[in-house]
Structure formats: C-alpha cells, structure tokens
C-alpha cells in the first residue's frame, strides 16, 4: 500500500488531504492515463494542481509512469 500524506502547502496555504488517497505526480503526457488509473483504483476523481503550486520537500518531482519531469500533482483534498 502506498504511503499517504496528511497535508501539503498549495499556493502557500496548508490543505488537509484525505488520508486514504495517495499523492501522485505525472508529466502532461501521462495525465489522462493516471487520472483513469486513479479513478479505477480509488473510485474517486483526484484534485489536480500544477506541481509548482504544491510545496512539499518529500513530493516526487518525476512522473510516476515514465520518470520524466513531473508537471501535475494528483491528490484528494479533504472536504472537496
């Protein structure tokens, strides 16, 4: 099972994440594929943010699929 985070900074504001959903990073080429995978696996659509808006030193900087430079973060913000 993937490790999940409790909160991250998005545009300088701390947001609480849904604990049972992972945070994934991807390139734009694989965004549609990972969106589909996220929905299939977790039965919920993730919230998406440009990587540069999400501040977290532990966050992967490369695509989950191909290892290229990440551009989009998929996660679930609590209460959304």
Image (tube, rainbow, N blue to C red):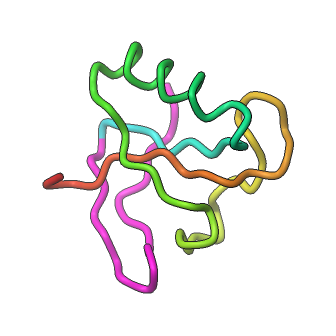
Rendered view: 21 above or below 54: above
Q: In screen coordinates, is 31 left or right of 64?
A: left
Q: How many marks?
A: 0
Rendered view: 37 above or below 72: above
Q: Position of residue 36 (x, y in %)?
A: 47, 20
Quadrant of residue 17 within the rendered picture: bottom left
User: Which residue is at 83% across, 31% downward?
Assistant: 66
Residue 76 in magenta stretch: no
User: Which residue is at 43% across, 68% downward?
Assistant: 8
Q: Position of residue 77 (x, y in %)?
A: 28, 54
Rendered view: 8 above or below 41: below
Residue 15 in magenta stretch: yes
Looking at this view, name the residue that lies furthest to the top: 40
Query: Range of the magenta residues?
Result: 1-19
Q: Position of residue 23 (x, y in %)?
A: 49, 45
Quadrant of residue 10 within the rendered picture: bottom left
Residue 7 vs residue 48, the one in the foreground: 48
User: Which residue is at 42% across, 47% downward?
Assistant: 75
Residue 7 vs residue 71, the one in the foreground: 71
User: Which residue is at 60% across, 51% downward?
Assistant: 72
Q: In screen coordinates, is 15 left or right of 27?
A: left
Q: In screen coordinates, is 17 left or right of 12?
A: left
Quadrant of residue 50 within the rendered picture: bottom right
Looking at this view, name the residue that lies furthest to the bottom: 12
Q: Position of residue 54 (x, y in %)?
A: 53, 69
């Amino acid at each position: 099972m993937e490790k999940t985070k409790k909160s991250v900074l998005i545009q300088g504001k701390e947001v609480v994440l849904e604990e049972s959903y992972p945070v994934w990073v991807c390139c734009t080429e694989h965004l549609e594929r990972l969106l589909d995978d996220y929905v299939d696996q977790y039965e919920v659509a993730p919230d998406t943010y440009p990587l540069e808006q999400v501040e977290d030193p532990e966050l992967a900087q490369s695509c989950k699929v191909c290892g290229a430079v990440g551009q989009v973060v998929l996660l679930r913000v609590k209460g959304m």
